[in-house]
Image (cartoon, grey):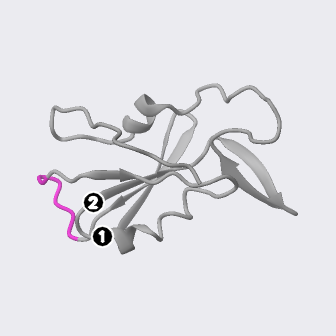
């Protein structure tokens, strides 16, 4: 799988293109959201177990940096232990979906998601 790191506003993300990627063929997109204290890199290793040829994967990084150990930082989508303002441009369905470059004139739909 081919890995590309990119940034959209303050949202950093990895796009994984399938083996044998053909830009003329439409592919379904799977957005993998990491859990509290992880990073966009953590779920990239899961993609080949789903399929290395049939999907494009987008793995965004949570916008909030959190400490997870001595000198180790992870990321989060929201603060858990204390109230605090969100980052300047918090991720939402529209800007996460805007990561996807679509060759068809249709809007993708967010079918479901889960945070662990």
46 part of magenta stretch: no
**Residue position marked by numbered label 1 in the rendering:** 51
Within-10-Å neighbours for mark 1: few <14, some 14–19, many 20+: some
Query: Is 57 left, or right, of 72 in this rendering?
Result: left
Residue 18 screen position, x and y as percent: 28, 65
Query: Is 38 left, or right, of 45 in this rendering?
Result: right
Q: Quadrant of residue 70?
A: bottom right
What SS does tag 1 mark? loop
Residue 95 screen position, x and y as percent: 44, 31
Where 17 falls versus 90 (above or below)? below
The range drawn in magenta is 20-25
**Residue position marked by numbered label 2 in the rendering:** 55
Where 56 falls versus 19 (above or below)? above
Which residue is nearer to you in this view: 104 or 114?
Answer: 114
The quadrant of the picture occupied by the N terminus is: bottom left
Whether the residues at callouts 2 and 1 have beta carbons within 8 Å, the answer is: yes
The outermost residue toward the bottom is 49
Q: Which residue is drawn at 30% across and 51% down?
A: 29
Q: Main secondary structure of the magenta part?
A: loop
What SS does tag 2 mark? loop
Within-10-Å neighbours for mark 2: few <14, some 14–19, many 20+: many
The outermost residue toward the right is 70
Q: Which residue is drawn at 81% across and 41% down?
A: 81
Q: Which residue is drawn at 24% across and 69% down?
A: 53
Q: Quadrant of residue 34?
A: bottom right
């Amino acid at each position: 799988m081919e890995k590309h790191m990119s940034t959209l506003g303050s949202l950093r993300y990895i796009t994984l293109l399938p083996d044998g990627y053909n830009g003329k063929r439409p592919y379904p997109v799977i957005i993998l959201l990491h859990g509290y204290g992880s990073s966009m890199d953590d779920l990239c290793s899961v993609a080949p177990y789903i399929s290395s040829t049939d999907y494009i994967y987008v793995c965004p990084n949570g916008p909030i940096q959190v400490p997870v150990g001595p000198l180790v930082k992870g990321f989060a989508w929201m603060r858990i232990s204390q109230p605090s303002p969100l980052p300047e441009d918090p991720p939402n369905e529209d800007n996460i979906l805007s990561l996807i470059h679509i060759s068809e004139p249709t809007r993708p739909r967010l079918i479901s998601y889960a945070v662990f």
